[in-house]
Image (cartoon, rainbow, N blue to C red):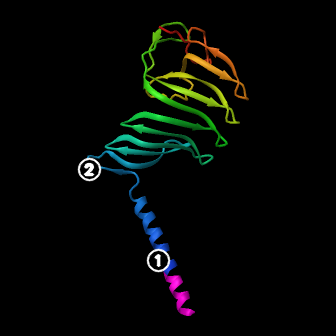
Amino acid sequence: MKTRVVLILAICFSLFNFVVLAQNGYEDKVNRYNHNGQKEGLWKENTSKYWRTETYYQNGKKNGIYKKFSTRRNELELFGEYRNDTITGTWYHFGDYGHLMMTFSEFTKNIHSIITGNNKGKYTPDYKCYMTSYYPNGRKKEEGLLLWNEGESPESDFSVEYGEWKYYDENGNLIEVKGARSETWRNSSRARIDEM
């Protein structure tokens, strides 16, 4: 009986040491540079007082899964993927209570021009994607194309609705469709849409 207890304790101690050493070995692989001085592998960074990111790099370029966390709530805020420093796939933006607020997909370079809000000229935002937002009950709220510039993000207040947008009630029923030639505004600071 005494031998069994000693054997069980020895096994538990060995497993504990294995787990601790395995985790320590993993931690040593975070925030590393390759032989060219470029970021490589998983990087965990506090990007501001409010945000922490986990990003995978290959030869200094974002390549793989990206996660952004709120440091106040310690919850996932944004989840997506990069390929060669370019946003790709479907991105998920979560709200304060962990519910899905928006998805972004079909990322491409943009060729559509818009008129600025004060009608002082036209410009062509750098990127476009398809955005769907959701009510807290999980049903669609709105969907359509967003345009935005380098250095911004599609969920920022500076992105612009473009083309046909569909709006739904909380039961998922389509209630309105707006087109590119109407003056569609998501925010007073956003530009008016003008299809060329």
Whole-percent x and y of residue 101?
A: 62, 34
- Quadrant position of residue 172: top right
Proximity of marks 1 and 2: CB atoms separated by less than 8 Å: no
Is tag 1's residue or tag 2's residue first in the polypeptide sequence? 1
- The percent position of residue 111, horizontal first and vertical second, equals 42, 16
The CA distance from mark 1 to mark 2 is 35 Å
Q: Position of residue 74 (x, y in %)?
A: 60, 48
Check if residue 196 falls in the magenta segment: no
Q: Is residue 55 above or below residue 131?
A: below
Residue 81: percent from the left, percent from the top? 45, 39
Residue that label 1 marks: 14
- Secondary structure beneath label 1: helix
Residue placed under numbered mark 2 in the picture: 35
Which residue of the protein is positioned furthest toward the left in this rendering? 36
Residues in magenta?
1-10
> What type is the residue that disc 2 sits on?
His
Identify the mark at residue 168; answer none if there is no mark: none
